[in-house]
Amino acid sequence: MGGTRIKIGLVHKGKLITDTSIQASAHISLAERLVEIGDQVDRLLEQTRSTPAGIGIAFPGIVDSVHHKILSRYVKYPDAQEVDLPGWAMGRWNIPLALENDARAALVGEWQYGSGRNSQDLVLITLGTGVGSAVMMEGRMLKGKHFLAGNLGGHMTINLHGGLCNCGNIGCLETEGSTWALEGIVKRAPGYEASALSGEPEIGFHTVFKMAEQGDALAGEVSRQILKAWSLGVINLIHAYDPERVVIGGGVMRSKDKILPVIREMIRKHSWLKENEPDVVAAEQPDFAGILGMSHLISVSRDKRASLL
């Protein structure tokens, strides 16, 4: 369930069979949104003549994946903490539900089907509307006492004098390098009025990187600052969790040839692991890692239940 769109897909034996998406629609409660999600799922099931074995939800917030509850208040769906998700799944299809944080779901998807294959010590960071992260150590997902562990890579402070983040912290990576903060960063920068960016109705990473290549001075400076912020965020995660591999996802990785070399060089210069730095790679499944990850988690949960019968 992304900040802009909700992706819905059917998966069979690790393969995405069909998919669709709907608007996230901030003005609609989660309880109301689930009605349309259910309708879309039914449409895909009818089209493929499929019977569901389970349903998974990857949610952009802190979740209790044991008791299937959303713990953090999410600006899009302020009623999310009160919604009975397992009850919805059982009432609509009589199937079990798996719930996980969206970055953790994406990590599982990349671990099983993408850039994380053959590694048991992974960090995933997603760059987009916000900055999400997830961590796997020795083949086990890191969660912690309150399900926070590894999830808040976007809310590590990288600028002591930075702005107030929407999480309440100061100078978070998100305030320095996320889509929601980018327009403010550009408009507050010296030289904005003289920049070609001032004529853009919407300012995104693609636009900033493109105009930097075209020689726009402000775009060049902003792109350097963004890349530095992302690099420092990755270094913080490396120092905290000592992974074998770092997987970077998000739509911005369509420009991976510009992004990855900068991050790798910053790691070599500024991290403790100057000679044995982890692999830093782009996600192979940036659009569907979360769906594939939830499918795998449903399968694992089903196998565990079967072993107890």
Image (cartoon, grey):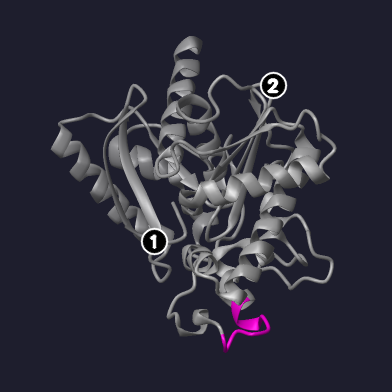
Residue at image coords 48%, 21%: 300
Residue 70, percent from left and from top: 56, 49
Residue at image coords 49%, 67%: 204
Pick whichever, 17 or 261, lies toward us. Answer: 261
Residue at image coords 45%, 50%: 254
Residue at far front of view = 215
Q: Is residue 62 visible?
A: no
Quadrant of residue 147 within the rendered picture:
top right
Residue under numbered circle 1: 24
Residue at image coords 45%, 38%: 289
Pick whichever, 22 or 45, lies toward us. Answer: 22
User: Label 2: how many residues lie within 10 Å, few (<14), some (14-19) or many (20+)?
Assistant: few
**SS label for mark 1:** loop
190 drawn magenta: yes
Horizontal side, residue 181 vs residue 169: left or right: left
Residue 259, percent from left and from top: 58, 50
User: Label 1: how many residues lie within 10 Å, few (<14), some (14-19) or many (20+)?
Assistant: some
Quadrant of residue 277 within the rendered picture:
top right
Main secondary structure of the magenta stretch: loop
Residue 135, percent from left and from top: 66, 36
Residue under numbered circle 2: 138
**SS label for mark 2:** loop
Q: Does residue 137 lie above or below 3 as drawn?
A: above
- State the extent of the magenta-drawn residues as a range: 186-194
Residue at far bottom of view = 193
